[in-house]
Image: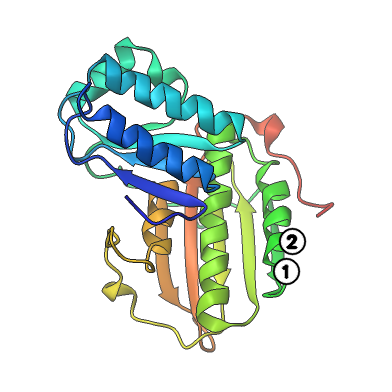
Amino acid sequence: MANVTDIAQVHVTRDLDVVSVPSFRHTIDSLIEKGCSSIVIDLSGATYMDSAGVGLVLYALKRMRAKGGRVSLTNVSSEIMYVLTVARVVDFLPVSQAGELPDVPKLDVAKLPKWRTVVQVDSSDLAGARDKVRELVARMPFSPDDAFDLVLAIGEAMGNAVDHTSGNSVVEMSCFDDRAVVEVSDSGEGFEPSEVPAQCDVTAERGRGIALMRLLSDSVEITPKPNGKGMVVRIVKLIASHDESKLGSAASV
């Protein structure tokens, strides 16, 4: 289990059945009671789920929604996916199967965004910057769950920038017809992106931000700034349905 933060991962290391469910229920209750806003249940260690396991997922979903949070499942095997589909659980929360994520289609360099805007992040008012980001994401045609994920991913990037630089950063948000592209840049000393592990150490207190961003979005790229010192975190979230009427405008933010 990850340490308690706004986003927490619960790593299921055995089958979810009537014997194992009580301990996982206790873990989820503890996270919710301590204020976690999003729980990602990683099922990579499970090959079987019975009705007790399905009940646990629905229990967690109900409790989190009552507090305005969400639950998602990741690394779901084909066998468990079948159970979740038959039980109609997939209709109520995000579920991603085991395996590599599909490649994000390259963005046509000639394609202009529907709108683009910049949010200045004051390190003394990170909450205010998150509110602006939340308003902008609400103008994109994402489902509530996808919008929640994107706001959390951007929040992680902004938090990392403040944490590692102790200074201000900049968020550039672009809305295309099939995706949101967000670049969070800072002016810190930087680091070597190739040294960032694909998955975080589940026992570590720090080092989870990038792993969580990768869980919450379709693509995360970390590169040095082309000019000056610092890093740029580029987050891409694909839009499931391209409804032109919902692409909105960023003019009033």
The front one of 159 and 171 is 159
Instruction: Name, please, the residue furthest toward the right.
Output: 252
- Name the residue rendered at 56%, 78% in the picture: 186
Q: Position of residue 59 (x, y in %)?
A: 44, 24
- Name the residue rendered at 24%, 45% in the picture: 100
- Name the residue rendered at 30%, 61% in the picture: 200
Q: Which mark is residue 128?
A: 2
User: What is the image's colouring?
Assistant: rainbow
- At label 1, counting other C-alpha atoms closer than 10 Å, the crowd grade (few under 14, some 14-19, many 20 or more) is few
Left or right of 65, for residue 3: left
Asked if disc 1 and disc 2 are in contact, CB closer than 8 Å, the reply is yes
Tag 1 secondary structure: loop
- At label 2, counting other C-alpha atoms closer than 10 Å, the crowd grade (few under 14, some 14-19, many 20 or more) is few
* Quarter where residue 19 is shown: top left
Q: Is residue 28 above or below residue 133?
A: above
Q: Is residue 200 above or below residue 224?
A: above
User: Which part of the image, by quadrant, shows the C terminus?
Assistant: bottom right
The front one of 78 and 205 is 205
> What amino acid is labelled 2 in the image?
Gly
Q: Position of residue 171 (x, y in %)?
A: 63, 65
Left or right of 114, for residue 160: left
Q: Position of residue 194 (x, y in %)?
A: 28, 73
Q: Which residue is mark 1?
A: 125
